Image (cartoon, grey):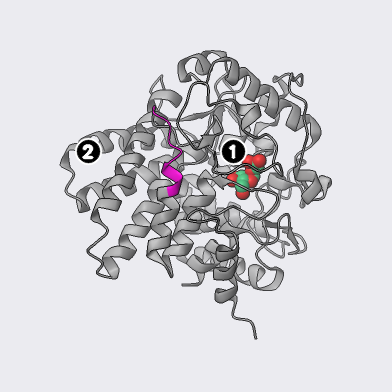
Amino acid sequence: MINVTDAARTILARNDRGGYTVPTDGLYPFQWNWDSAFVSMGFATFDIDRAYQELERFIQGQWNNGMFPHIIFHVPSDSYFPGPDVWQTDQCHSKKPLTSGITQPPVFGMALRFLYETVLATGRHDMLARTHTLFNAALRSHRWWLEARDPDKRGLVAILHPWESGSDNSPAWDEALVRVPTTTKTEICRQDTKHVNATMRPRNIDYQRFIHLVEVYRECQWDPIKQWSHAPFKIADVQMTAILARATADLIWMASQLNLSDALGELFTMHQLLINGLNSRWNQHIRGFVSLDLISGKDIEKPTQTCFIPLIALELDSYQRKFIQEEIERWCQGMVIGIPTTAPFSPDFESKRYWRGPVWAVINWLIADGLRKNQLKELATIIEGNTISVIERAGFCEYFDPITGEGLGGNTFSWTAAAYLVLRR
Ligand code: 9YW
């Protein structure tokens, strides 16, 4: 019988490109921001040095202003669009390696704590300097988040591009995206549909808008202040804010472990601001947390997984806990595997199309973690158990059809392997 843990480690080894890991061979040939953070936690379950290396290679792409980009183009490849020639970030950000010009969810701080806990548990004494370097990079990136993406100090950070959310074509962005023109100067040469069935991917019209947004920000020379005022898409996203708030709490833990009292005050202030912001986004009708469209001023009341992610950062009251538990159970009713990324009763639900319904192991990992933090251990255990079994049945796929349990997208996915290693421990 094949040992699935060994198979998961083999996926990480296959996708290793010399100290950093690609999400999957072919489809995504570079280092992605939040993928790498999850992957480093997977590595930490069996090779702590390699786990640190993953984050160290990643911070090579950090911008002078502190931003962690969403893609680091360590080596050229023509199997992905849009590449560095479209982003053109080298004109204002001259450091190598080349990168994209937007960001992704800041799981990095959560990963750093996970790695350092592993170091402490194994009694390693030689990791302090490496840990400090990573901590400083994380702190700079959190400062960037608040300055660049919450200039009005709402305690909610904004995404300026759906790719930043990590849930590219989620129904949560539909209404806001309609306002984004579909015209582009760049010729769109999609590569993703050469690797994966087009019916499971974002549509061409989505890509036109994604590239239009890249062009707007490129014309702003990637300057955060100009981008903020020119952005045709600006959403205070509860998933992003929750991950940032949780990562900030993890950096507070790190700062106290490392006796960095100077950083502590600043981190506490940041954390409180974000917690207040998130708490203000509870929506009784949706029975979850909702993002805010900063251009239309409207709440985004689409039932997507983002509604549950704030559990990783907040302590819910007993009513919220009850409502969230009931809601997650309702979404999973009749599904072979939960939690769907869009509620199955929603008219937007598509069980096979990217972020419009399928289940992602890393999202389940985050939600289960949030449920545990909020004393909903039984439900957390069920979700973790289902995630492990679907991977054992269907393989290390990018995502899974909740109705059939079928594995879809790329089939040797690094973060799915990492989720398996961490949830199976
Ligand atoms: C893209 C790599 C990335 C993930 C995102 C996912 C997809 C497409 O793949 O993005 O072109 O960036 O939506 O969350 O990080 O796995």
Q: Is residue 99 left or right of residue 216?
A: left
Callout 2 secondary element? helix
Q: Residues within 10 Å of mark 1 (few under 14, many from 20)?
A: few
User: Residue 51: x and y, percent?
Assistant: 42, 59
Which residue has dot 1 on it? 285
Q: Quadrant of residue 248?
A: top left
Is residue 21 shown above or below 294?
below
The answer, for residue 205, to whether it is visible in the render is: yes
Label ID, residue 263: 2
Quadrant (top left/top right/bottom left/bottom right) for the N terminus: bottom right
Residue beneath the point at 56% across and 43% down: 307
Q: Which of pointers 2 and 1 lies earlier in the amino acid sequence?
A: 2
Q: Is mark 1 within 8 Å of ligand 1?
A: no
Q: Quadrant of ligand 1?
A: top right
Looking at the picture, which amino acid does disc 2 mark?
Ala
Q: Is residue 254 left or right of residue 94?
A: left
The answer, for residue 317, to whether it is visible in the render is: no
Q: CA distance from mark 2 to mark 1?
A: 39 Å
Q: Residues within 10 Å of mark 2 (few under 14, many from 20)?
A: some
User: Residue 170: x and y, percent?
Assistant: 67, 39
Residue toward you, 116 or 221: 221
State the extent of the magenta-drawn residues as a range.
Answer: 57-64
Looking at the picture, which amino acid does disc 1 mark?
His
Residue toward you, 28 or 383: 28
Main secondary structure found in the magenta portion: loop
Residue beneath the point at 59% across and 46% down: 30
Callout 1 secondary element? loop
Residue beneath the point at 47% across and 35% down: 96
Outermost residue to the bottom: 1
Q: For residue 178: magenta?
A: no
